[in-house]
Amino acid sequence: MSSDSFIELKNVSFAYGDRPILQDISLTIPRGKLVAIMGGSGSGKTTLLRLISGQVLAQKGQVLVDGQDVGRMSSRDLYQHRRRMGMLFQFGALFTDLSVFDNVAFPIREHTRLPESMIRDLVLMKLNAVGLRGTEALMPAELSGGMARRIALARAIALDPQIMLYDEPFTGLDPISLGTIALLIKKLNDALGTSAVMVTHDVHKSLEIVDHVYFVAGGKIAAEGTPDEVRHSSSPWVQQFVQGEADGPVHFAYPATQGLAEAFGIKGETA
Amino acid sequence: MNALLNPIRRLGALSINAIWRLGFISRFFVAILLNSGQSLLRFRLTIREVYFAGVLSLIIIIVSGLFVGMVLGLQGYNTLARFGSADALGALVALSLLRELGPVLAALLFASRSGSAMTAEIGLMKATEQLEAMSVMAVNPIARVVAPRFWAGVISMPILAALFNVMGILGGYLVGVEMIGLDAGTFWSQMQNNVDLHYDVVNGLIKSLFFGMAVTLVAVFEGYDATPTAAGVSSATTRTVVTSALVILALDFVLTAFMF
């Protein structure tokens, strides 16, 4: 698997200040595949994406993209690296002062010197790909959440990236929009041949479309496998996550330092 | 012992924090200057911000200027008349506006009208991940978002201050000549004799250039540095107005000491 790996994390550790987020994580994303990273909220999934995009740098280990270490890139190289990368943000992150058309045209205008007529064709093609041609004159505030996410997807693929990063693409969408986004992600990945990483906690939808799954918990890879292996995994942790049970290896309660009785100020009993 | 030491500790922490922010804002200023190429080469980006910061401030500047000039006319006449020198009203109105009131009041109005808007806009762009999205698209947000706004502020401020002056003088004329009935010829000739182009007009405009830089720098910095939450953006906006006002008045003292 590592022979055709496009993105590779080798023994990566990362901490915000003295709060460790990731500890000694290694994983690979093969060329042209769609890989999901799952885990509970606050497990460091999004940090993994930020490491790949170079928004944060690993304190230990290497983040290799096409053989280049993101952590050792100069800022010029980093911008070069980001040009072949598309990222879909959790809530789209559309530029609220630009129309839909200008949002999708933004990366093209910033990075190329194409004539306006060609930009127009490209933008309409991308909008057509996400099924929203005809919305180009609208402003982001006039879009529904699902539509905004699709426009953001069109913007992310505007320059035909080799790498796609999806940050919680399914959060806060109704079932129909969610299905549409999932279908689009799958279709675009097949059509463009991009290597894609998707961070999500929507288990069922993701298992339908991805090629490989990594589970992150407590800053480490807790489990991995193909969707079929995950569904039939014997690991209680994976089962709890896939079935969405409240209690199990991952506890329902936050580890409090005081006992309940003590917190309520009841003394005498052993708290 | 702690009760004795804590206020001292807090004072120390406050000073360290203030110095740290001063260093941060200076580095931010340098970053803006280094990334200004785009806002000057693609001047349309800056023009767009000149519209939002400058053109949309016209009404408040024009109306305030007119009223300040009218008040100057009234107060100036009452005081001057006591000493029998009401003829000097034109010079009084023009000099106080050109040297002090025009640049300072226009800058204060600009800070609360456009500075706060810049902070809120950049802060909200940060809160909604727009700045991050931009940087992930390999577009430097300082070059694309911050620098055009900064230069727009620097360009707009002297023009707005000049307009404020013009409206103020007009207001002084309306009150002094049209309402009170001073001689128009005296009003204007006193003004012409006592106002020096370089010493008064240009120095005033240089002041407002400095104010424009200070106000916009504070505004874009507070926005860029805002905690990306609703409360964070709101307190950053407040800080912009408060800090700008203090910086304008302090800077005014320093510049006046050097100039006049």
Image (spheres, coloured by chain):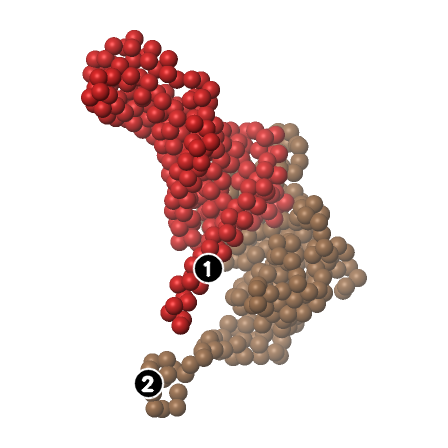
Q: Which chain is brown?
A: A
Amino acid found under the numbered disc labelled 2: Ile
- Work out which quarter of the rendered image holds the C terminus of chain A and state it: bottom left
Where does residue A48 sit, x and y in percent of width and height? 62, 61
Where does residue B222 sit, x and y in percent of width and height? 47, 46
Q: Are marks 1 and 2 in contact (CB under 8 Å)?
A: no
All told, the count of numbered labels is: 2
Which residue of the protein is positioned furthest toward the front in this rendering? B83
Q: Is residue A126 visible?
A: no
Which residue of the protein is positioned furthest toward the bottom in this rendering? A269
Amino acid found under the numbered disc labelled 1: Gly
Residue B43, picture quadrant: top right
Residue hosting label 1: B12
Label 1 crowding class (10 Å Cα cut-off): few <14, some 14-19, many 20+? few
Please give the name of the residue rendered at 68% of the width and 65% of the height, measured from the top-left corner. A60
Mark linked to residue A266: 2
Residue toward you, A10 or A39: A10
Chain containing the residue with disc 2:
A
- Work out which quarter of the rendered image holds the N terminus of chain A and state it: bottom right
Please give the name of the residue rendered at 42% of the width and 81% of the height, measured from the top-left corner. A258
Label 2 crowding class (10 Å Cα cut-off): few <14, some 14-19, many 20+? few
Residue toward you, B135 or A246: B135
